[in-house]
Image (spheres, rainbow, N blue to C red):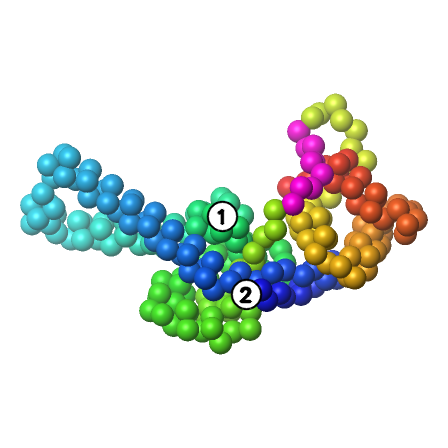
Amino acid sequence: MKTVKITTPENIEIEYRLAGLGARGAAAVIDLLIQAAVISVIILALMAFQINPRDLVDEYSGWIIGGIILLIWLIVYGYFIIFEMVMNGRTPGKKFFKLRTIRNNGQPITIRHSIIRNLFRIIIDTYAIGIILMFFSNKHKRIGDYVGATIVVAEEEKDVPQVIVSRQDKKYTYSITQEEYQLLKDYYRRKDSLEENKEKLEKELGDYFAKRLDTLKDEREYGKFLDEILEQGLVSK
């Protein structure tokens, strides 16, 4: 499987596995099935209440047509935006196949990125153009990914130290941002597969957090230091 190296805003290089075309396609099928199920439920609800769409159109033609267009737009377009925001770059299909959409710099996507990438999904990429482009893109990007500055990666589920952020009586040693916490989680997920780059990345992370948190640490203790940050760090929103 192809990989891509991303340099984060903290000037730390992390290697991600690119989402395969098959996994992305299968994830898209699951999402489409969910959307179809929602539309089917709406149709069944109309049938259950014995509502004849033709009668409604005859009486309220303009409102009904506008409402149907809006509803379909929300289901087809809003589905991806809502889930990507709630599930941090995932949709149900992507979650099933352990895929995630992130920004080109490795940070989580914002609503602006989601709106842009999914707008192009609806108006262009749906018509097989996006699928064809992914075959020729070295990062498996469709047009929406290029315009939205995003990329889809495959995640490796690995255990990471648990961060405690809710107890009021705990004295926190470190305070880190959500982006820094995500950066550390990504490192722990991938460190076993980094091989010779593991020590280099650990040193870069250690140097960054030692400077960022204004603390002196021996380079030989950087691994323990990173563990401490996750275990004793207060994640700010």
Residue type at mark 1 is Lys
Q: How many marks?
A: 2
Residue 84 can be seen in this image: no
Q: Compared with residue 228, is residue 138 higher up or lower down, i.e. above or below? A: below
Mark pair 1, 2: CA separation: 21 Å
Q: Quadrant of residue 149?
A: bottom right
Instruction: Say which quadrant the N terminus sits in.
Output: bottom right
Q: Residue at x 53, y 50 (%)?
A: 98
Q: Residue at x 73, y 58 (%)?
A: 194
Q: Name the residue at the bottom extreme.
A: 136
Q: Which residue is mark 2?
A: 149
Q: Secondary structure at mark 2?
A: loop
Residue 227 can be seen in this image: yes
Q: Name the residue at the top extreme.
A: 169
In this view, the residue in front, 146 or 138, is: 138
In this view, the residue in front, 141 or 115, is: 141
Residue type at mark 2 is Ala
Q: Secondary structure at mark 1?
A: helix
Q: Position of residue 19 (x, y in %)?
A: 53, 60
Q: Main secondary structure of the magenta part?
A: loop
Residue 164 painted magenta: yes
Judge the density around disc 2: few (<14), some (14-19), many (≥20) Cα neighbours within 10 Å.
some
Number of the label disc, if any, that sits on residue 95: 1
Task: Specify start and end residues of the magenta stretch as a single range.
Answer: 158-166
Judge the density around disc 1: few (<14), some (14-19), many (≥20) Cα neighbours within 10 Å.
some
86 relative to 56 in the view: left or right: right
Residue 9 painted magenta: no
